[in-house]
Every structure is written in structure tokens, then in C-alpha cells.
Image (tube, helix red, strand yellow):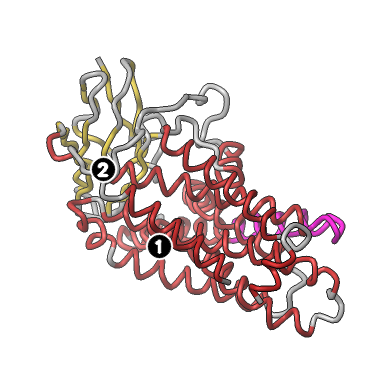
Amino acid sequence: MRKLQFIAALSALAVMALVPAASSADEMKTYEITVKDKVFTPNEITVKAGEPFRIKMTNANAMPVELESSKLGFEKVAAGFSDILVNVRAQTPGTYTFFDDFHPKETTGRVIVK
Amino acid sequence: MLGALIIVFREVFEAGLVIGIVLAATRLVAGSRWWIAGGVLGGIAGSALLAMFAEVVSQWANGFGQELFNAGVLAIAVCMLIWHNLWMARHGRELAAELTAAGQAVSEGSRPLAALAVVVGVAVLREGAEIALFMYGIVLAGGDSWSSLALGSVLGLVLGGGVSALTYLGLVKIPTRYLFSVTSGLITLLAASMASQCAAFLLASGKVNVLSATAWDTSWLIDEGSILGRLLHTLIGYAQSPSELQVLVYVVTLVGVVALTKALSPSHAPRAAAAGR
């Protein structure tokens, strides 16, 4: 088993080497949206191309909401009456949709990247 | 009702596939069903707990607790999958040789079984917490649609079980002498897939900021949200617009597991196998 333990130790080290990478996330611009009665307000936000940003979503319902966008690369659940933050990678100009995965057709919004 | 069914089914789909693969991989190991059932039950219990404390978890790490939690449990699952495959590389041949007289193989088999039970538990936990939250929401919302939503959810769960059954039944059709290689291959891909998802969560948490640029975008080809996309996502780790880190982690895990499996398998390194016992 010694060889396996060695491998495990090596992988653990590799993971640790990656994790403490400092983050500049705190200076990112944050856009706030609220979801209530299956509607995002605002349901459209405009952001700058090439800059990472954050979305803070406040869930004003008792029902949980799963904020998701496969194009922007996030998928996160907010329990009833709580808020969540998502980090979004820098994007190229275009229009990207996001939605509540529990109501993917009804509850949608757009991010316009300029 | 259909809406609830689809939501729940989509969530259990991935866990269903994983359970099917693990069931097939351990089909011939006595007691494996109990371990896997234990993994599923543990995952369900964990889901309920996680849903209950969703808000608390969310608030960890300045609002990125969910991502770190997911990355953590995925990392554990990846280690378990790798452990299982390396162990099997050493002992698989003996297991195959002693299939019928499984006596000793069983006691030795218990180790990777514990590892796989953890993997199943993690697969259930990750998707289960969302289902638990969703169903909790249905109960909270009450109203006329309550019973039909609940029925839809239960049917979605049953269909997810169907995915496990189909995966399992499809895999066990493969002749026994190939089954081991096929399931090892699937588990290796699963490990690479989960490792790359772990990397995605670390990036999403903002705690890791290396190689975060998008490597490519194949959303025009296969939509990650489609059934095919979800299938490929679970089986081979398909992501429509992966970050460079995800791609790197995927390739390193895949190559690493294949190389280690080769190095540890008895025909290549008989002495290493003997020393390990």
C-alpha cells in the first residue's frame, strides 16, 4: 500500500498548491437582481465585455430558486427568502440568458455583454 | 405535474447513471449491494441535512460555501474512484479467476466497496439536496397543485431509478471477461469527469483563479442541458464551454489513472503488487 499512500499524498499536495491562489474577486462589480413570483427584477443587466463580474440574487419567495445559465457557467440554488452570489467569468460581447432551473421557461433573464 | 417530474428526473439522472455503473462494476462481489444501498441511503440522509442547512452552507466562505462544499465532496469521490481502480488493477485478475469461489475475494473486495459506497453517496447527495429543497418548496407553497406536484416528483424519482436499472442491465449484458475492463474504463472517465467538475466549482467559488479562460464553446453542437448533453456530462465529463483549468484537470486525471493502472497491474509490476499485500 505504500505506493498508493505516496500517490495520495502527492495528489493532496497538488490540490493544496492550487487552492490558496489569491482571489481578486472582492473588487468585482456585483449586479443585484431579485426574484419574486417567478419574475426576475431587473430581468436584464448590461455588463462590460472581458471583465469578470458577480450576480447577487435575492430570492423573495418561499420556494427555492436555482439560478442557472449554461452559457455563463453558473448553477446555484437559493433557498426560500435567502440570497446567493455567483461569479461569472469574463465574457465576449453578446446576449446570454439565465433562468430559474425550477421554472426554466417562465423565469428567465438576460445578460447583455458589451 | 409534468414540470415537477422533469425537474426531479433531471436531477436524479446523473446519480442514477453512477449507481448503475457501480452496480455493474461490483456485480460479482458478494455484499456489494448492501454497500451501494448504504451509499444511497447515506446520500439521501445527507441531502435532507444539506437542504435543511442550505442557507448556512451558502453563507460560508463569503457566500461561496455551496461551491466549496461541492468541490470538496467531488474531490473525495475522485480519490475514491481512483483508489478503487488502482486496487482493482492489482486484484482484479484474481477476482476474475475466483469468481465462483469468491470466498477470499469477498473480504478483500470490501475495501473498494467502501470507496464506491462513498462515490454513490456523493452522487446522490449532490443532486438530492436540490430535490429535497424543491420538494420542501412544494410542501411550503401548498395550494391545490400540491398533490400533483408531489406525484410528479415521486414519478421523477422512480424514473431516475429506471435509469440506474437500464444502465445496469445494459452493462451486465457485456460478457463477464470484458465487463471488468468496460466498468474500469467507465470509472476512470467518471473520475476525470468529477475532477473537472471539482475544478469548475473551485473556479466558480472565486478562491481559485488560474486558467479560468474558456477553452472552447461547443454549445452549438451539444447543449449541456439536453438529455444527450447530460448523459455525456456524467459519463465523460462533457462541458459545453469548459475553462482551461477544467480541461487540464480532466486530462491529468485521465492520463494519471491510466498510467498508474498500467504500472500497478500484476503483469507489469508483479513485485509492487506483492509488496502491497
Amino acid type, residue under disc 1 in the picture: Ala
Q: In which quarter of the image is residue B28?
A: bottom right
- Magenta residues (range): B158-179
Relative side of B173 to A4, left or right: right
Which quadrant is the C terminus of chain B positioned in?
bottom right
Give the percent coordinates (x, y) of residue B42: 48, 73
User: On screen, B18 above or below B117?
Assistant: above
User: On screen, B158 above or below A105?
Assistant: below
Identify the residue at image location x=22%, y=63%: B56
Asked if residue B242 lies in the magenta stretch, the reply is no
Q: Quadrant of residue B72?
A: bottom left
- Please, which chain is the residue tagged with disc 2 on? B
Asked if residue B169 lies in the magenta stretch, the reply is yes
Please name the residue that numbered disc 1 is placed on.
B132
Please name the residue that numbered disc 2 is placed on.
B206
Identify the residue at image location x=20%, y=41%: A23
